Amino acid sequence: MTIRIVRLGSPRSADEGPRIGTVRRPPRGVPKAEFAAQNWYDVWYPNLAPSAETMKLGQEAQTPAQWAQFVKRYRAEMATPEAGHSLALLATLSQGTNFSVGCYCADEAHCHRSVLRQLLADKGARIDPD
């Protein structure tokens, strides 16, 4: 049993399980009833998304130093008790079921999900290496 870290909207893997959208906003122009059918997500969970201000910092990052600033700020947001409980819950669930978490970004290396992957691993989550 594992967590997959995915790009929302991409084709699902056969054993992926439910998708959790860790994004600040739902996909534009997609009716709510179509989110799961179009492979966006089954459950929207913005609690693990960067704040709007932090997200903008990450999107505008052009240098390693700017990206490091984004990572630092996002990690600080995820250090709150509420976020810590969410991370611990997902890590625990990964021990017994398959599911995925994701974001819209094309490049995981330049997306909060790369940081989220590590935060979940730090909590003991079983993460699919793909």
Image (cartoon, rainbow, N blue to C red):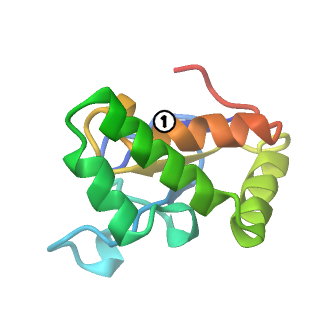
In the picture, measured across the screen, residue 105 lies left or right of residue 3, that is: left
Q: Secondary structure at mark 1?
A: helix
> For the image shown, how many numbered marks are present on the structure?
1
Percent coordinates x, y for residue 64 in the rendering: 32, 28
Percent coordinates x, y for residue 96 in the rendering: 84, 43
| Residue located beneath label 1 in the image | 114
Q: Quadrant of residue 50?
A: bottom left
On screen, residue 37 above or below 113: below
On screen, residue 116 above or below 114: below
Percent coordinates x, y for residue 111 in the rendering: 37, 42
Where does the N terminus fall, quadrant-wise? top right
Return the residue nearer the eye: 84 or 3: 84
Return the residue nearer the eye: 91 or 78: 78
| Residue depicted at x 25% and y 31% | 63
Q: Work out whether residue 113 can be spotted.
A: yes
Return the residue nearer the eye: 13 or 28: 28
Q: Residues within 10 Å of mark 1 (few under 14, many from 20)?
A: some
Looking at the image, the residue that sits furthest to the left is 29
In the picture, measured across the screen, residue 20 lies left or right of residue 90, that is: left
Amino acid tagged 1: Ser
In the picture, measured across the screen, residue 66 lies left or right of residue 101, that is: left
| Residue depicted at x 56% and y 62% | 48
Q: Quadrant of residue 97?
A: top right
| Residue depicted at x 83% and y 36% | 124
Looking at the image, the residue that sits furthest to the bottom is 32
Looking at the image, the residue that sits furthest to the front is 65
| Residue depicted at x 34% and y 78% | 33
Q: Quadrant of residue 86?
A: bottom right
Q: Work out whether residue 38 can be spotted.
A: no
Percent coordinates x, y for residue 45 in the rendering: 54, 69
In the picture, measured across the screen, residue 107 lies left or right of residue 69, that is: left
